[in-house]
Image: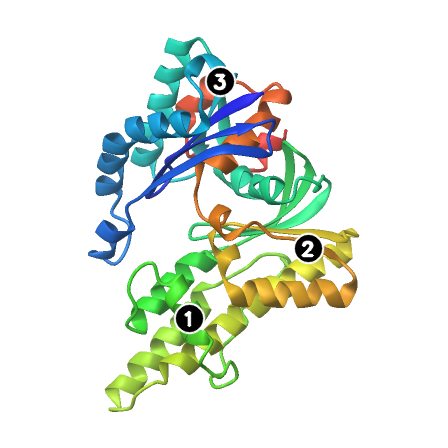
């Protein structure tokens, strides 16, 4: 079964053809990073316009690379939430028209579920149930993956997402957008213990995250040093920040795994490409005898392959587009598990 997956939730216009949920036949991504870098972050209006300009040729390129026509496609999967509303509307509207004109079923895919599914491409042997740490620019979740299309969110950020925190700290340290990779590179040359940073906790919610205080602590340290005419060692600060945020993510995930009895752990989302997070999580799992699955770097960020992969499992589960697509960006991962 061949699924065409379309992704347009933020600043990547992506399309992919995936066969039987795990074999990627094509994976085309049109990135807008260079343009948004001029503004220090994603500008929603620009993102929506670029999606509208790119989505047709990206889809054609994905079909061509896969050696397919729409006659060979069994269903069209599209990201319907969460994300930038204008960007999502471009992908959903295009997918609706494409599916209708080709006479194919339309499968709505939750973006976070898509990130989780990226692991099935890199690790076909992975099967639910397991616990997954999802970390990206807009999301930080600990998710019980009960089945391929059923989830239970047991922890989430109460304020900033970890990826957003990376980007804002990076900007404070003078790096360009997106800042995650610059923090990662600088951290390799820094001392992770040079600066003592807070480990915020959410009272009464042991699995939830809070990153705004950590972000503010770094910003205040940098600004206070500047006011005194002092300089902050950028590499040391990057290393200390990355070490702290990695500790927070990994400690919460390991606590949840212990309490809920999981020995299989997944990592997903854009921040899953961060070397500090990957290394700490791998060490923590090795220490406890847990099996860890992480996506290949090319599937960490937003892409169509993860949407097509999840679309395959959602199609088998009987999920089809209905009135839910009229409420895009409003449904949580909890609700799609019902």
Label 1 packing within 10 angstroms: few (<14), some (14-19), many (20+): some
Q: Residues within 10 Å of mark 2 (few under 14, many from 20)?
A: many
Q: Residue at x 43, y 82 (%)?
A: 236
Q: Position of residue 64 (x, y in %)?
A: 39, 26
Does any portion of residue 332 appear in the rendered image? Answer: no
Task: Identify whether 305 is placed above or below 104.
Answer: below
Which quadrant: the C terminus? top right
Q: Could you tell me how far apart the alpha carbons at marks 3 and 2 are, in whole angstroms?
A: 33 Å
> Marks 3 and 2: CB-CB under 8 Å?
no
Which quadrant: the N terminus? top right
Q: Position of residue 179 (x, y in %)?
A: 36, 63
Q: CA distance from mark 1 to mark 2?
A: 24 Å
Q: Return the mark for residue 73.
A: 3
Secondary structure under the numbered disc 3 in the rendered image: loop
The structure residue drawn at horizontal position 75% and vertical position 58%, both measured from the top left corner, is 290
- Of tags 3 and 2, the one toward the viewer is 3
Quadrant of the image occupied by residue 29: top left
Label number found at residue 162: none
Q: Is the image coloured rainbow, by chain, by secondary structure, or in one colour? A: rainbow
* Residue 185 tag number: 1
Q: Earlier in the sequence, mark 3 or mark 1?
A: 3
- Please determine whether, in this image, residue 308 is positioned above or below residue 139: above
Label 2: which residue?
292
Verify CB contact (< 8 Å) between mark 1 and mark 2.
no
In the foreground, 260 or 5? 5
Task: Depth check: give the residue in front, 273 or 133.
Answer: 273
Q: Secondary structure at mark 2?
A: strand
Q: CA distance from mark 3 to mark 1?
A: 41 Å
- Number of numbered labels in the structure image: 3
């Amino acid at each position: 079964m061949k699924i065409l997956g379309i992704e347009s939730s933020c600043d990547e216009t992506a399309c992919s053809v995936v066969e039987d949920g795990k074999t990627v036949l094509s994976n085309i991504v049109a990135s807008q990073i260079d343009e948004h870098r001029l503004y220090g972050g994603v500008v929603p209006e620009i993102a929506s316009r670029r999606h509208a300009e790119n989505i047709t040729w990206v889809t054609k390129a994905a079909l061509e690379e896969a050696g397919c026509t729409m006659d060979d496609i069994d269903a069209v999967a599209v990201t319907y939430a969460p994300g930038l509303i204008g960007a999502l509307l471009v992908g959903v509207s295009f997918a609706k028209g494409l599916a209708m004109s080709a006479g194919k079923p339309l499968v709505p895919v939750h973006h976070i579920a898509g990130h989780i599914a990226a692991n099935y491409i890199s690790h076909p042997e992975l099967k639910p149930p397991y616990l997954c740490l999802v970390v990206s620019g807009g999301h930080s979740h600990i998710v019980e993956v009960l089945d391929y299309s059923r989830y239970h969110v047991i922890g989430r950020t109460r304020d900033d997402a970890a990826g957003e925190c990376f980007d804002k700290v990076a900007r404070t340290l003078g790096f360009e957008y997106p800042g995650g990779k610059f923090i990662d590179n600088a951290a390799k040359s820094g001392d992770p213990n040079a600066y003592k940073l807070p480990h915020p906790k959410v009272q009464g919610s042991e699995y939830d995250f809070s990153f705004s205080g950590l972000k503010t602590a770094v910003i205040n340290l940098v600004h206070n040093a500047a006011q005194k005419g002092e300089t902050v060692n950028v590499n040391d600060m990057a290393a200390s920040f990355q070490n702290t945020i990695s500790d927070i993510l990994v400690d919460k995930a390991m606590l949840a795994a212990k309490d809920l009895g999981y020995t299989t752990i997944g990592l997903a989302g854009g921040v899953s490409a961060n070397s500090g997070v990957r290394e700490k999580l791998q060490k923590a799992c090795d220490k406890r005898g847990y099996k860890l699955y992480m996506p290949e770097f090319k599937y960490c960020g937003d892409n169509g392959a993860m949407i097509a992969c999840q679309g395959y499992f959602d199609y088998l589960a009987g999920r089809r587009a209905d009135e839910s697509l009229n409420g895009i960006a409003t449904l949580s991962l909890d609700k799609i598990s019902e």
